[in-house]
Image (cartoon, rainbow, N blue to C red):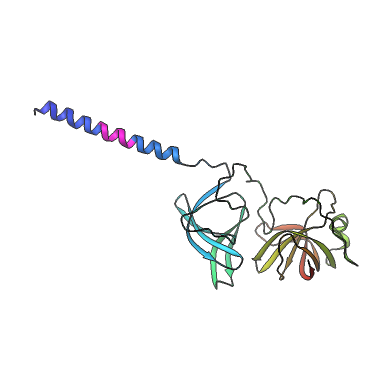
Amino acid sequence: MNRNKIIFTVVLLLLGIFFIITIVYRSGEKSKVVLPPGTHGVKVGEVIQTTNYTYLQVEENDNKFWIAIVKSDTKPGDSVYYSNDYEMKDFVSKELGRTFPSVFFVQDPSNKLVRENNANQPRTPGKGELKRWNDISVEIPKGGKSIADIYSNPGNFGGKEVTVRGVVVRYNAQIMNKNWVHIQDGTEYSGKFDLAVTTSDSVTVGSTVTFKGIIALNKDFGSGYVYDIIMEQARLSETR
């Protein structure tokens, strides 16, 4: 084989290798999932189960971090997609006896990509996009107030103990050493139909509960977690 043939053969081999690499690279690019703005897609590495939450060490763009979701059967290797989360720094899990330097509590985890962009939803404990539940009709407890009463005259209730009854529409356990509850009673004032409650008692979504607690106004928990009206130190007196 003369020199020209050797050069020609080498060039063909190099072109073939380049062609194969290009095809593989482009195939990989096409297989990447294009995420809507504000949406995270993470791969699960480590899983830690607790009573109410599943803690996941995940990876996104070569960055590893911890997220927490409502207890699920998520396994290592699974994918999780979400757009509504809030970060808690130096979060202490009493159940695990462990402090996480940073953990993101995810409100809308899914094993499938949701194309709707929820990036502008509020990201505070127990908050998020809360829709009004239909067909809620709750009898106001004796001596109590409706959610509409509280929102229509907040100055009358600030710093005072109030009794309310409502249906639990969201529940987040043990965030900042509190359980966060959102209740609705079917009443509304100026578009406000939901009351946030912090308590040490446990409840379940869909149950009807009666709480007695202190109404706080313009409550700032730090890191942007601000509520115009919230019930604190609430005690559960009835559930059904």
Residue 196: x %, y % from top left: 75, 60
Which of the image's four quarters has the N terminus? top left
Magenta extent: 15-21
Name the foreground residue: 212 vs 114: 114
Residue 215: x %, y % from top left: 81, 64
Which of the image's four quarters has the C terminus? bottom right
For this orientation, the residue located farthest to the right is: 143
Name the foreground residue: 14 vs 90: 14
Residue 49: x %, y % from top left: 54, 66
Residue 214: x %, y % from top left: 81, 68
- Residue occupying image coordinates x 84% and y 58%: 147
Quarter where residue 159 is shown: bottom right
Q: Does 220 sit above or below residue 188?
A: below
Q: Is residue 200 left or right of residue 10?
A: right
Q: Is residue 176 left or right of residue 217?
A: left
- Residue occupying image coordinates x 58% and y 69%: 92
Q: Which secondary structure is most common in the magenta stretch?
A: helix
Q: Does 145 sit above or below residue 6?
A: below
Q: Is residue 160 visible?
A: no
Q: Does 131 sit above or below residue 238?
A: above
Name the foreground residue: 130 vs 98: 130
Q: Is residue 158 in the magenta section?
A: no
